[in-house]
Amino acid sequence: MLDQQAERVMALSEWENRWQENRIGFHQPALHTMLKTHLDKVLSGRTGVRFFFPLCGKAVDMKWLADLGHTVVGVEISEKAVRQFFEENNMTFTEELVPSIPGAKLFKNLEKNISLYQCDLFSFSSSVGGQFGAIWDRGSLVAINPKDRERYAALIMSLMASDCRYLLDTLLYNPEFYKGPPFFVPDEQVQDLFGSSCDLELLQSTDALTDRTRTWGLASLTENVHLITLKENFHS
Ligand SMILES: C[S@@+](CC[C@H](N)C(=O)[O-])C[C@H]1O[C@@H](n2cnc3c(N)ncnc32)[C@H](O)[C@@H]1O
């Protein structure tokens, strides 16, 4: 089943075009229910956690977490998305170049501790943004090109602090009927990508078929949420 989407490539310019043409059906105007449901498990008693949002778009979940006192760092290729995030949430922001990433910009709201890097995720690293106590991955692993998944998993694990709790949202459907993105990521592949260095727990599995996803030609769609933590000694 993985073969069907293995060669599918979305160029960064195609994502930018989607933003320019407002074809952003992936954006949800309300807080993601699975983040809300599992936040306690992600926090595990901690306060003031540093959250990472790979491929963040303009997810309102970032503001929700910042309002709860957490720090948020996101990475997004589209400058339009980043600007819209701050504008639509009535937040002022500063803008600066990132010397270590050619062409990248950093947008920040200091009051709420939100920093969004406008750059390719694969040029971001812990030397630029440090490590994180939590990650919310919605529309990210499922959106990057399938051939980049191993590279993606290695990058994400390098960004995880030893106590990091990584909440990963994946989608299961029959890829014969839809070419993606979002791409089909079966649990076996989550295990292959992270299982040798991490402990994995499937927290929730939900029927996610909607009118929108029915128009993709799908008759069934499942959304899974995994909690991923580094095994001891990963960083040693
Ligand atoms: C499916 S959307 C999900 C956005 C967000 N996580 C959400 O839940 O609304 C994927 C986003 O990643 C951005 N993107 C895709 N590839 C990227 C890359 N390699 N680096 C940075 N951003 C990327 C796209 O512009 C798009 O906004």
Image (cartoon, helix red, strand yellow):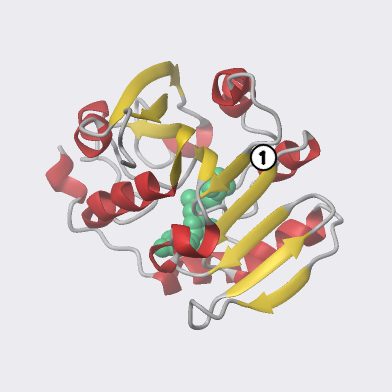
Residue bearing mark 1: 61
Q: Position of residue 73 (x, y in %)?
A: 61, 53
Q: Position of residue 158 (x, y in %)?
A: 37, 49
Residue at x 26%, y 40% (from the top left corner) = 177
164 and 167: which one is in front?
164
Residue at x 77%, y 59% (from the top left corner) = 86
Q: How many marks?
A: 1
- Give SS at disc 1: helix
Q: Is residue 226 above or below residue 62?
A: above
Residue at x 34%, y 42% (from the top left corner) = 235
Q: Is residue 33 above or below residue 8?
A: above
88 and 129: which one is in front?
129
Few, some or many residues within 10 Å of mark 1 (<14, 14–19, 20+): many
Q: Is residue 195 left or right of residue 143?
A: left
Q: Is residue 108 left or right of residue 8?
A: right
Residue 68 in view: yes
Q: Is residue 68 left or right of residue 151?
A: right
Q: Position of residue 49 (x, y in %)?
A: 64, 36
The three-letter code of the residue at mark 1 reads: Asp
128 and 42: which one is in front?
128
95 and 50: which one is in front?
50
Quarter holding residue 22: bottom right
Quarter of the image containing the C terminus?
top left
Q: Position of residue 114 (x, y in %)?
A: 71, 53
Quarter holding residue 12: bottom left
Q: Is residue 46 above or below residue 142?
A: above
Quarter of the image containing the N terminus?
top left
Residue at x 55%, y 81% (from the top left corner) = 99
Q: Is residue 205 left or right of residue 86?
A: left
Q: Is mark 1 within 8 Å of ligand 1?
A: yes
Residue 179 in view: no
